[in-house]
Image: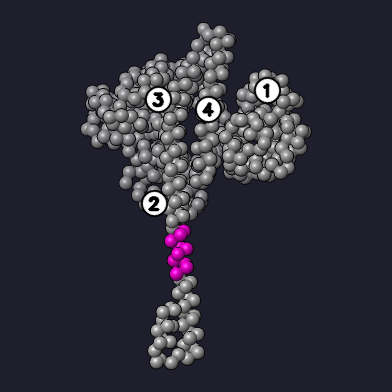
Amino acid sequence: MIAVIEFFSHNTIQLTDEMLTLLQEVSVQLAFVVERKQNEAMLLQMREAAEAANQAKSAFLASMSHEIRTPMNAILGFTQILLRDKSLNAGQQNYLGTILRSGEHLLGLINDILEMSKIEAGHVQLNLEAFDLNQLLQDVHSMFRERFQRKGLDLTIERSAGLPAYICSDEGKLRQVLINLLSNALKFTESGGVIVRVRADTAAGFLHWEVEDTGVGIAPEEQHKVFQSFEQTRSGLRSQSGTGLGMTISQSYVRLMDGELSLRSEVGQGTVFSFYSRYSLAAADQIQQRQAENRRVPGLAPEQPAPEILLVDDKDDNRRLLHDWLQPLGFRVQEASNGLEALKACKQTAFDAVLMDTAMPVMDGLQAIAALRNLSLPKQPVVISVSANAFAHDRQQALAAGADAFLAKPVHEAELLKTLQEQLSLQYLYEDAAGGVSSEPMAQAPAKVSADQLSADTRQALRDALDSGDLEQIELLAQNLADESPALAERLQTWAQNFDYEQLSTFLAEAAP
């Protein structure tokens, strides 16, 4: 623009004041446009740098998760098997218990970091289910009792009058919040003890919680650090333990339950963490069904063919663990160490199910699943992807390749058996409270449902309702399916009523293109 003005000043064209004013206004607008373009370019560079950093973080977390979960799968799994051995003396049982607790603590650290990544991405949702509130409190007390006794501390749980026995909430997240708060209190308390108080506001549908300790307390100027990621107070740094994520995760969980986690503390006197969480009442029969499903399975129910299972994993320890879980129950088990061996085995044997690891040499699990689905076999086996890569996109990749289900390592025996039961419509025997084996099979597994049972129009209508958060439309669409597919209608209604949009979204994504 300056060059334009100089051009006019060196020529005979006479510029009026109005023309000069116009040229100056145009100059200002052009400068504004240039500055905006520069800012946009800078923002683009910053966004690309942030995306690159996020990708690097995701790659690091995925690698770290895999490297830790793989050996932890064997450590925790074989420890659980050894703990069943009634020939071990009390001291040996205690040693194994210490190994199990230490392994679960290590796994908890990596889970904290992974969970924080999910929270930052907004991928954490509630999993509402019916459970026994008194049993939860008893479990948490049992989990910490010995550790408190070793430090000479008291652990007391005070339940108010009128506390409901059975509630519907997110038991897992509520349990984790209590574990984080009690772990924190135990860490910073050297004398006295800790009291957990819970009371119910039935009219409002909230539980009110307090965890009070007689520990070192938190200085006022440091209290803001408690709920910040990777931040620790001076006391926390001196303890040299934890990731600095426990309270951040707890706050996120509590907010998902429509609550808020807060604290009041005085140095040298102790700290009180308090929060409230929403709940609804549950029926006793809902709890009984869950308790039946969680009983230990000593074997398959009689009068059913022994399922043929192929275990595919490049780690001998992982194959042996699954073998030692399944073979004593009556499953017929074969093994393969990579995807190529698995394909050869599937051509020779009609397997009912294949448990497929993901990361393997020669041919990885995803390639093997895709190739298996293209084989012309008399019967395609159920494929359960078993992976130490535990992110949501790892599950989606496995399902997209053709897997029927996904299990993250470390695999829990109960979760594995439940998945096999659902996928193969199995019946199990179960162990009663006295340790005896009953011939009564467990409750029939829920009917298997698939998004492919839905018409393309219905799937699209459900996706539209999901995108807009239209709960009533989802329930209406489910009701319309009640006559032709009651099991599918019931599953859709359950997800809608529990606001479990993530499960519904994943279910719809599994439909064939």
Q: Position of residue 277 (x, y in %)?
A: 64, 40
Residue position marked by numbered label 2 in the rendering: 460
Q: Is 453 situated left or right of 160 in this image?
A: left
Q: Amino acid at mark 3?
A: Leu
Q: Residue at x 43, y 56 (%)?
A: 45
Q: Which residues are magenta?
A: 34-43
Query: Of the residues tagged 2 and 1, which is closer to the observer?
Result: 1
Contact between labelled residues 4 and 2, with CB atoms less than 8 Å apart: no
Q: Which of the marked residues, 3 or 4, is nearer the chain's N terminus?
A: 4
Q: CA distance from mark 2 to mark 1?
A: 54 Å
Q: Depth check: 20 or 312 in front?
A: 20
Query: Of the residues tagged 3 and 1, which is closer to the observer?
Result: 1
Secondary structure category for the residue under label 3: loop
Q: Which of the marked residues, 2 or 1, is nearer the chain's N terminus?
A: 1
Residue position marked by numbered label 1 in the rendering: 148
Residue position marked by numbered label 3 in the rendering: 426
Contact between labelled residues 4 and 3, with CB atoms less than 8 Å apart: no
In the rendered image, which quarter contains the N terminus? bottom left
Quarter residue 261 falls in? top right
Q: Residue at x 43, y 53 (%)?
A: 48
Q: Position of residue 233 (x, y in %)?
A: 66, 38
Q: CA distance from mark 3 to mark 1?
A: 42 Å
Q: Which of the marked residues, 4 or 1, is nearer the chain's N terminus?
A: 4
Q: Is 348 situated left or right of 96 in this image?
A: left
Secondary structure category for the residue under label 1: helix
Q: Is residue 326 visible?
A: no
Q: Is residue 46 visible?
A: yes
Q: Amino acid at mark 2?
A: Gln
Q: Residue furthest left?
A: 376
The vertical placement of 11 against 423, above or below, is below
Residue position marked by numbered label 4 in the rendering: 106
